[in-house]
């Protein structure tokens, strides 16, 4: 029998900007119920200019333009003028490949395949969640390879456990690298994916509370089958949801 997985990426990003101006707006004090800006000014011009021969950004009329402090390094940050944006990295999430092939399975053998997740954030942290649409399912829909219970029958979608015994079938995953859950003690520890068909709640597989640059983790998928497993192609989809926090 042959097993294949399709890996999908989903991202949820929400930015709420609001402010209601009340009262008389003064030249050096802007305020609402939500904020106060003291010693503000209106620039003559700011932005990006370009032609076939050059590209330049500028802030004209700003007193003391530029960034002061650095995200994730100093205890403060002040952005004065348009140029401060160069301190703010874009949120970045990448999956190294979107097809996982576990090959042709037979009893007493475990097959693996892997890919990497790469994350960079702006000035905040992030979380990456994962879930499977269903267990590895035969193309006919009549048979499934159950999610692993690991060697001691104790792993689930929340906690990883050792899975080394080749006679124990199932499907699971291991995480290694940056910002992974601490229950993945080493490469022998596996979990189930949360199964939304059950339904189960998607679980965090990478996370950080602070500014993060080029954080990389490896996801290793593993499957094994019992002797009475029906022959054929089995597949499912694994979804990763990357959420930045600002």
Image (cartoon, rainbow, N blue to C red):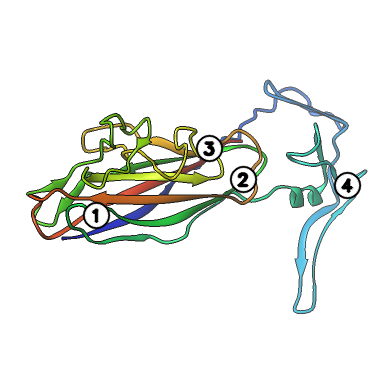
Please give the residue where the numbered disc 1 appears in the rendered image.
109
The mark lying in front, picked from 2 and 1, is 1
User: Residue 84, position in %: x, y?
Assistant: 79, 47
Q: Earlier in the sequence, mark 3 or mark 2?
A: 2
**Would residue 133 be seen by someone viewing this image from the given angle?**
no
Q: Helix or strand or loop: what does disc 1 sit on?
A: loop
Query: Above or below — where is 184 with respect to 110?
Result: above
Q: Earlier in the sequence, mark 1 or mark 3?
A: 1
Q: Nearer the viewer, residue 157 or 74?
A: 157
Q: CA distance from mark 2 to mark 1?
A: 40 Å
Give the left or right position of residue 114, taking residue 23 as reference.
left
User: Residue 90, position in %: x, y?
Assistant: 63, 51
Q: CA distance from mark 3 to mark 2?
A: 11 Å
Q: Residue at x 64, y 30 (%)?
A: 19
The mark lying in front, picked from 3 and 2, is 3
Q: Residue at x 25, y 47 (%)?
A: 166
Please give the residue where the numbered disc 2 appears in the rendered image.
121
Q: Nearer the viewer, residue 47 or 10?
A: 10
């Amino acid at each position: 029998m042959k097993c294949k997985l399709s890996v999908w990426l989903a991202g949820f990003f929400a930015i709420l900007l609001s402010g209601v101006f009340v009262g008389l707006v003064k030249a050096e004090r802007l305020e609402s119920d939500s904020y106060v800006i003291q010693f503000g000014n209106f620039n003559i011009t700011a932005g990006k200019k370009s032609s076939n021969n050059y590209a330049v950004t500028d802030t004209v009329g700003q007193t003391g333009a530029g960034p002061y402090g650095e995200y994730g390094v100093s205890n403060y940050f002040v952005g004065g003028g348009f140029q401060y944006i160069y301190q703010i990295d874009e949120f970045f999430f990448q999956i190294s490949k979107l097809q996982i092939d576990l090959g042709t399975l037979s009893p007493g053998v475990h097959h693996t395949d892997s890919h990497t997740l790469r994350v960079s954030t702006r000035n905040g942290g992030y979380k990456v969640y994962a879930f499977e649409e269903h267990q590895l399912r035969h193309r006919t829909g009549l048979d499934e390879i159950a999610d692993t219970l690991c060697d001691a029958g104790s792993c689930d979608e929340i906690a990883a456990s050792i899975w080394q015994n080749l006679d124990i079938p199932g499907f699971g995953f291991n995480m290694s690298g940056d910002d992974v859950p601490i229950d993945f003690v080493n490469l022998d520890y596996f979990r189930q994916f949360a199964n939304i068909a059950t339904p189960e709640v998607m679980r965090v597989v990478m996370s950080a509370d602070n500014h993060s640059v080029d954080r990389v983790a490896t996801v290793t998928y593993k499957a094994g089958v019992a002797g009475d497993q029906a022959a054929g192609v089995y597949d499912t989809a694994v979804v990763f949801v990357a959420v930045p926090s600002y």
